[in-house]
Image (spheres, rainbow, N blue to C red):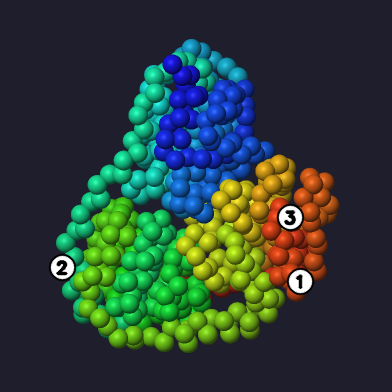
């Protein structure tokens, strides 16, 4: 009969898990010992936050479950910020955290056991889709199975699974993993939705991360072959469509925002209209709104829908594509895209050079919460689904490099980070080297927290706390055995990106923030 750690890994393998990210600790060493012969690759990182960010980056790049294994107490607590980002962005991530031995736990009593937390599961409840504690060793494989299903089915999101450390060495019977896909729910009646579409003269498709996670891209293109409507994507849906009517810029650019204002029907697929995309809901309510979402709570959360369709984004979009009438294009999207390109060149010639260098890279781009990352999130032309990972769910600085580690396990990746955010996880240069990952880290060094410096400057405040002492990033990388180059400005970046990685490119440059950052939003509250 297998031990709990072996059964845990067997259940994950039965669900198709091939890689997990983690950090060993005294309470989870049994998992490391059980890895041999499991068929699962363990990517060892240098911080628990990195483990979950990497699992998230892997999930975003692949569409598969990302798994992080962390240890008890402070190890689990270190994973919270990254788990919150996965929750806000709808990433299917499983966080397996050990807990103190069940034999030493007394309900309601904090005894002071090493790494003990009064209620470790409760820490994760606000930042997960579900938080579970395994109640008995015999139930460990069944709880792993349940956790995987919760994370990956329906409205996806992270799940916490707490495992007392003694359960990992207890003998447990295997539990058959639930690997059969559930029957797909029938598409609801679309009569009211079709009536809205038929009466619209200037429809707009607004497509969010839920549509991307559902794999709705082909259905979306089929729908728009008949609708001939502009397609505006949120950060989470970048790359879902290369339809000729796909808009290549953020709604924060006035030329794109005008499409929203002029539309007589917005068809929202897999989105919740969050504050970052709507300029904190300063975009006026659409004249008419058709909302499609798998999560009932998201259908009319921020803008009340005239018609709400509860269902899978792919299935509903495909059904709409079969039934909607053919319409003539009411907008010249190419002229809008041309206006966006002109705007970027006029607004920031340096950013235009930067975007040009990134544009043709055959790689997953992972951006951090930093000024170059904001330019990427807003204006980088993503050509493939899952080609961009961007942390504006929760907005966690320090996401870019560790999430790119997870993406790079799948294939070539480029991390775009600032000097401040890179220091959050620079120790994982050791992971980059140890795993020999095809990852290029582009560190844009502007001397500190450039976005916060801009905020202080525009508010007329004293510049304080944002200018940082930094290492020589190239020498830092080389000390880990990772090749590095340093550039002054972006002119040589395209050539530097011909190296597949692992490597680091340091760019000494300062960019002004783009219009998709809140200080530059063009919609303003009424006085």
Q: CA distance from mark 1 to mark 3?
A: 15 Å
Q: CA distance from mark 2 to mark 3?
A: 55 Å
Whichever of callouts 1 and 3 sits on the residue coming sooner in the sequence is: 1
Residue that numbered label 3 is attached to: 503
| Circle 2 crowding by C-alpha within 10 Å: few under 14, some 14–19, many from 20 | few
Could one spot residue 119 in this view of the protein?
A: no
The residue beneath circle 2 is 191
Element carrying mark 1: loop
In this view, 132 is above or below 314: above
Q: Are marks 1 and 3 in contact (CB under 8 Å)?
A: no
Q: Is residue 478 above or below residue 496?
A: above
185 vs 252, left or right, is left
Residue at 40%, 63% (x, y): give it: 208
Within 10 Å of the Cα at label 3, are there few (<14), some (14-19), or many (20+) other Cα atoms? many
Residue 344 in percent (x, y) is at 60, 79
- Counting residues from the start of the chain, the first of labels 2 and 1 encountered is 2
């Amino acid at each position: 009969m297998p031990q709990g750690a072996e059964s845990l890994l067997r259940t994950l393998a039965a669900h198709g898990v091939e890689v997990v990210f983690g950090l060993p600790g005294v309470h989870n060493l049994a998992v490391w010992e059980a890895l041999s012969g499991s068929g699962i690759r363990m990517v060892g990182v240098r911080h628990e936050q990195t483990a979950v960010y990497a699992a998230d980056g892997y999930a975003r790049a692949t569409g598969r479950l990302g798994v992080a294994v962390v240890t008890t107490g402070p190890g689990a607590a270190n994973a919270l910020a990254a788990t919150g980002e996965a929750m806000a962005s709808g990433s299917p991530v499983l966080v397996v955290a050990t807990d103190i031995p069940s034999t030493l736990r007394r309900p309601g009593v904090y005894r002071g056991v090493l790494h003990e937390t009064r209620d470790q599961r409760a820490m994760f409840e606000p930042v997960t889709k579900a938080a579970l504690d395994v109640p008995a060793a015999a139930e460990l494989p069944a709880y792993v199975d349940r956790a995987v299903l919760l994370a990956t089915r329906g409205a996806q999101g992270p799940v916490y699974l707490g495992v007392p450390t003694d359960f990992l060495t207890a003998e447990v019977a295997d539990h058959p993993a639930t690997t059969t896909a559930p029957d797909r729910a029938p598409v609801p009646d679309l009569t009211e939705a079709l009536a809205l579409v038929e009466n619209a003269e200037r429809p707009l498709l607004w497509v969010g991360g839920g549509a991307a996670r559902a794999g709705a891209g082909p259905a979306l293109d089929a729908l728009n072959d008949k609708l001939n409507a502009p397609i505006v994507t949120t950060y989470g849906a970048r790359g879902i469509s290369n339809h000729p009517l796909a808009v290549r810029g953020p709604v924060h650019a006035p030329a794109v925002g005008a499409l929203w204002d002029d539309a007589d029907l917005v068809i929202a697929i897999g989105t919740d209209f969050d504050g970052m995309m709507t300029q904190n809901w300063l975009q006026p309510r659409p004249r008419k709104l058709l909302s499609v979402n798998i999560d009932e709570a998201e259908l009319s959360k921020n803008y009340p829908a005239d018609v709400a369709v509860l269902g899978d984004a792919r299935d509903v979009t495909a059904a709409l594509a079969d039934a909607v009438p053919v319409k003539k294009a009411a907008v010249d999207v190419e002229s809008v895209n041309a206006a966006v390109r002109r705007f970027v060149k006029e607004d920031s010639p340096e950013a235009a050079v930067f975007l040009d260098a990134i544009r043709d890279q055959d790689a997953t781009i992972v951006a951090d919460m930093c000024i170059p990352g904001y330019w990427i999130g807003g204006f980088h032309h993503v050509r493939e689904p899952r080609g961009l990972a961007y942390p504006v769910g929760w907005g966690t600085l320090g996401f870019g490099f560790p999430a790119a580690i997870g993406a790079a396990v799948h294939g070539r990746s480029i991390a775009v980070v600032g000097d401040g955010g890179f220091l959050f996880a620079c120790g994982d240069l050791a992971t980059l080297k140890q795993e020999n990952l095809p990852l290029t880290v582009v560190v844009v060094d502007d001397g500190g927290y450039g976005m916060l410096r801009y905020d202080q400057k525009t508010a007329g405040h004293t510049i304080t706390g944002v200018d940082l002492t930094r290492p020589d990033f190239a020498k830092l990388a080389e000390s880990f055995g990772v090749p590095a180059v340093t550039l002054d400005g972006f002119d040589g970046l395209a050539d530097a990106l011909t190296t597949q990685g692992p490597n680091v490119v340091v760019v000494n440059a300062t960019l002004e923030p783009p219009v998709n950052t809140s200080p530059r939003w063009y919609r303003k509250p009424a006085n």
